[in-house]
Amino acid sequence: QVQLVESGGGLVQPGGSLRLSCAASGSIFSRAVMRWYRQAPGKQRELVATVTSGGDTNYADSVKGRFTISRDNAENTVYLQMNSLKPEDTAVYLCNAIYVVVNYWGKGTLVTVSS
């Protein structure tokens, strides 16, 4: 069983930065594909960024050049560094782990970008 706990969300002004963390329990972290999703009110869940077990990354077009996903396998943690934040980045950000065919989800952390 894997448990994911997100942290680091909050209120930030447009143009600001936040760093989200997702701490994972369990022994499969280093072999799992890790993803950040987000869900804004009234909108569908959106895939934001992916990091594979080998460290390859991929991003949604809407965040390319502004967000960076990284992982620390020694700490069982995945990060999302978010820079140049925009009001449209406001959402609940959820951590996801995929191992074999099983998906694990955290409960999310709220990011609000507003002046």
Image (tube, helix red, strand yellow):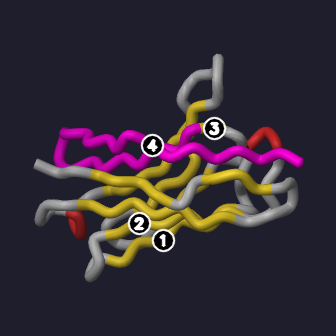
| Nearer-the-camera pick, 63 or 20 | 20
**Residue that carries the numbered disc 2 in the rendered image:** 78
Front of the two marks 2 and 4? 4
**Crowding near the residue tagged with mark 3, few <14, some 14–19, many ≥20 C-alpha atoms within 10 Å:** many
Indicate whether 81 appears above or below 94.
below
SS at mark 2?
strand
Q: Earlier in the sequence, mark 3 or mark 2?
A: 2
Q: Quadrant of residue 52?
A: bottom left
Does residue 90 appear left or right of residue 16 in this picture? left
Instruction: Residue 47: give x, y in percent of width and height.
Output: 54, 41
* Callout 1 amino acid: Ser
User: What is the CA distance from the residue labelled 1 to the residue labelled 3?
Assistant: 20 Å
**Mark sitting on residue 108:** 4
SS at mark 3?
strand
* Callout 3 amino acid: Ala
User: What is the CA distance from the residue labelled 2 to the residue labelled 4?
Assistant: 13 Å
Instruction: Residue 90: give x, y in percent of width and height.
Output: 71, 40
Q: Residue at x 34, y 44 (%)?
A: 106
Front of the two marks 3 and 2? 3
Q: Earlier in the sequence, mark 2 or mark 4?
A: 2
Q: Earlier in the sequence, mark 1 or mark 2?
A: 1
| Secondary structure mainly formed by the magenta segment | strand
**Residue that carries the numbered disc 1 in the rendered image:** 70
